[in-house]
Image (cartoon, grey):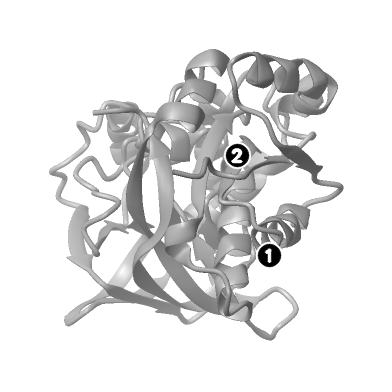
Amino acid sequence: MTPPKTVFLVNPASAGGSTGRRWPELAHRAATLGLTGDALVSEEQGHLTALAEEAVRGGATRLVVVGGDGSVNEVVNGIAGSFETSRGSRAEDVQLAVVPRGTGWDFARSHGIPRDLDAALDVALNGDVREIDAGLVTFRAWAGHEGRQHFANVASAGISGAIAQRANETSKALGGKISYYWSTLAVFARWQTGEMRVSVDDEIRAGRIIDTMVANGRFLGGGMMMLPEAEPDDGLFDVLVIGDVTKRDLAFTLPKSYRGKHLPHPRLEVLRGRVVTVDADEPLPIELDGEQPGTTPARFEVVPRAFRLRKPRE
């Protein structure tokens, strides 16, 4: 069997910029363990999408993301873009691997990919290959036109988009968990809950809803296990609809979410389906793997077995 052609897709700004500073050391360690290939280094936010497309069109069959959740999101969009525009590229030809270097690393956590460098490199080199679903989202971009992007782990509409934006704009020197926790408290304190309309296949919910989370993976926000039963390859989203929660609800429930013990709750409901739509009287921010590309109205559609992921061996 021909070994995969490996390309590293590196976000030098991840982990507070230490990835860029340490990349020669990281590359040397990977080579020592037997994982070698060309490196494409991002120059700005969004650049990894184009680099991933370039890598796939150049024949790469193993893309190793060195970065955080946003980096994984960009690469997944690049892989999808390469399939859509190149007749010679097939999903079954390309494997995704991740060396977690961000502050949140919720995608890696959802799939059991270790944060330890050597262990993550071993998974990239020798791990099992598993077909994973993705989400395709249509939304209103900030510039006003219709946007269309994929996500790999969790997307949402409502307060979590504002929380992610605040977390990204503030220092993450103390880590993703603390950053997201304090951002949640700060944004919630001034958030005005409005009317939201949510459909999950044939199920419809409407009323004072603070957030709707659409998940392939179990973790988000620096380690919150918000959807503890989500499976990334079952062809369905797990959808968490969060009603008009109070400050007391938040104080008691938020710490439990890190252990996946916040459910059941009278103001939280989990639904499952293939297509989710969210709309509101006033546009609400959406979030895709921690990034904020626009607002509602939004449509989330599951793409079964969209890409192949290197995971720890069973």
Count of numbered marks: 2
Q: Is residue 303 above or below residue 65?
A: below
Residue beneath disc 2? 64
Q: Amino acid at mark 1?
A: Arg
Task: Tell me, yes or no, if residue 193 can be seen here.
Answer: no
- Relative horizontal placement of residue 285, taking residue 21 as reference (left or right): left
Q: What is the quadrant of residue 89 in the picture?
A: bottom right
Between 111 and 246, the one nearer to me in the picture:
111
Q: Which mark is residue 57?
A: 1
Task: Name the residue located 46 percent from the left edge and 54 percent from the top edge.
Answer: 152
Image position, residue 312 (x, y; %): 35, 28
Task: Tell me, yes or no, if residue 249 can be seen here.
Answer: yes
Please name which of the two marks, 2 or 1, marks the residue nearer to the observer. Answer: 1
Image position, residue 53 (x, y; %): 68, 63
Dot 1 falls on a residue whose secondary structure is: helix
Between 259 and 268, the one nearer to me in the picture:
259
Q: Residue furthest bottom?
A: 145
Q: Mark 2 and mark 1: span between their CA atoms?
A: 15 Å
Q: Is residue 267 above or below residue 212?
A: above
- Relative horizontal placement of residue 134, taking residue 257 as reference (left or right): right
